Amino acid sequence: MDYQNGVVDMLDEPDELLSRAEEAIATARRAGAHVGYVRVAFEDADLEAVPPTSRMGQRARTMGNTLHADSPTTAVHERVAPEPGDIVVRKVRVGAFSTTDLDARLRERGVETLILAGISTSGVVLSTVRDATDRDYRVLVLADATADPDPEVHAFLTERIFPRQTDVITVSELEELLSTAGGS
């Protein structure tokens, strides 16, 4: 989630993270799992509809065209880019569900388990973990394919907060998990 050019560029050293995300996606594809992408991007009408009380809207407005849906900065990074048949949604809030049809698209495909990775741990990942568990998905977070601009916040969330609601695993554990579960 939010593995888009402008967000990846916020990280000091994104190469290892992108490599692990590539590996996780390849592992999921080999197991026959569905792969989905969530990106934050605004159309002009989206920005006009956001109330002035919204911090996300305030940030989007101050960033000018860098968060516009047509901007190269909102495109999914080429190293982890979607393939035909993947689920791709565009959001205008922090979490993956509230402003998208992601839930309906996952349920159409019979998906019950979500394996999440994204940037940032304290933003899209945290919001999506909470919302997905409220929607009764089984949720796993790939701790080493997820990052936050603040590494201490990432560690705190993946080690102390997420384990209360989800399973936190690594990319190296993913292949075994999918081979025994039969991917979804």
Image (cartoon, rainbow, N blue to C red):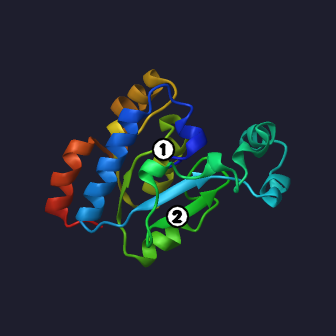
Residue at the image position 48 percent from the left and 48 percent from the top: 130
Do the numbered discs 1 and 2 sit on residues whose CB atoms are within 8 Å?
no
Residue at the image position 48 percent from the left and 67 percent from the top: 87
Judging depth in this view, the residue of 71 and 116 nearest the camera is 71
Relative image position of residue 80 (x, y in whole percent): 43, 51
| Rendered-image quadrant of the C terminus | bottom left
Relative image position of residue 55 (x, y in whole percent): 74, 38
Q: Residues within 10 Å of mark 1 (few under 14, many from 20)?
A: many
On the picture, is 74 further left or further right than 172? right
Query: Label 2 sits on what residue type?
Result: Val
**Image disc number at residue 125:** 1
- Determine the secondary structure under disc 1: helix
On the picture, is 181 further left or further right than 3? left
Residue 10 seen in this snapshot: yes
- Provide the residue designation for mark 2: 88
165 w.r.t. 132: above or below: above
Mark 1 vs mark 2, CA separation in Å: 16 Å
Residue at the image position 34 percent from the left and 41 percent from the top: 19
Residue 164 seen in this snapshot: no
Judging depth in this view, the residue of 165 and 27 nearest the camera is 27
Residue at the image position 27 percent from the left and 69 percent from the top: 32
- Determine the secondary structure under disc 2: strand
**Looking at this rendering, what residue extends furthest in the top direction?**
152
**Looking at this rendering, what residue extends furthest in the bottom direction?**
108
